[in-house]
């Protein structure tokens, strides 16, 4: 696990440093000189000038790093293949294993659609919440969005929890009953009850 974390950090470190260094170079010297004339210490200059002016660059780095970490597949596949005992298993590798190793395309496609729906729901709820916070939505829709902005986050979290519970119960049911084979849909079929 620690080796995968180190390799993933090392892969993203160069790109993130280039973005952050370009942001540091774009900070005008006149702000730092004015703060120095006013008697600000180096810590005050960092927290009052450098950090706020770097906020857009840092937001970009955080978003791109999160996207990169959600797409982690190659490091885990090459180094550990999800082992030992699935401690390094990630969602991309899990979908890959169900689709190509266990030949359960229906289960893998259900996992992909659940993950995609969760991300779409999260993006929509965050955009609506941001619009409501900034007051972009006008009229009745703006008032509703402003009053119910917590409900958007709650609904996306509730949906993802329900899907997770479904997948966990399905996996437990599959292990307990055994002898399952998945078709193109996500519903299991007991193979020993089919009479030909």
Image (cartoon, rainbow, N blue to C red):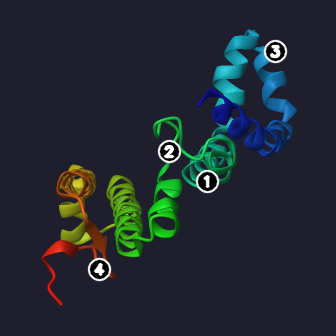
Indicate which label's residue lies in the foreground, 3 or 2.
2
Q: Kindly identify which numbered label has been placed on residue 185.
A: 4
The one nearer the camera, 156 or 125, is 156
Q: Residues within 10 Å of mark 1 (few under 14, many from 20)?
A: some
Helix, strand, or loop for circle 3? Answer: helix
Percent across and percent down for residue 170 are 22, 58
- Mark 2 or mark 1: which comes first in sequence? 1
Tell me what residue is drawn at x 50 percent, y 44 percent: 89
Helix, strand, or loop for circle 1? Answer: loop
Q: Kindly identify which numbered label has been placed on residue 37.
A: 3
The one nearer the camera, 102 or 116, is 102
Tell me what residue is drawn at x 46 percent, y 36 percent: 85
75 left or right of 91 in image: right
Q: Is residue 105 above or below residue 93?
A: below
Q: Are marks 3 and 2 in contact (CB under 8 Å)?
A: no
Q: Are marks 4 and 3 in contact (CB under 8 Å)?
A: no
Percent across and percent down for residue 80 are 62, 41
Helix, strand, or loop for circle 2? Answer: loop
Q: Kindly identify which numbered label has been placed on residue 159.
A: none
- Mark 2 or mark 4: which comes first in sequence? 2
């Amino acid at each position: 696990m620690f080796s995968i974390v180190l390799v993933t950090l090392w892969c993203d470190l160069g790109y993130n440093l280039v973005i952050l260094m370009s942001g540091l170079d774009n900070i005008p010297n006149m702000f730092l000189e004015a703060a120095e004339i006013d008697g600000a210490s180096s810590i005050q200059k960092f927290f009052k000038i450098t950090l706020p002016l770097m906020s857009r660059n840092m937001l970009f780095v955080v978003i791109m790093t999160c996207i990169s970490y959600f797409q982690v597949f190659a490091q885990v596949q090459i180094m550990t293949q999800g082992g030992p005992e699935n401690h390094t298993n990630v969602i991309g590798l899990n979908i890959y294993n169900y689709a190509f190793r266990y030949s359960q395309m229906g289960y893998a496609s259900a996992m992909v659609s659940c993950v995609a729906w969760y991300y779409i729901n999260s993006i929509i709820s965050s955009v609506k919440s941001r619009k409501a916070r900034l007051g972009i939505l006008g009229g009745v829709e703006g008032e509703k969005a402003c009053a119910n902005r917590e409900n958007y986050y709650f609904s996306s979290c509730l949906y993802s929890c329900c899907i997770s519970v479904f997948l966990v119960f399905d996996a437990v049911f599959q292990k307990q009953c055994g002898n399952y084979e998945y078709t193109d849909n996500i519903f299991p079929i007991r193979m020993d009850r089919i009479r030909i």
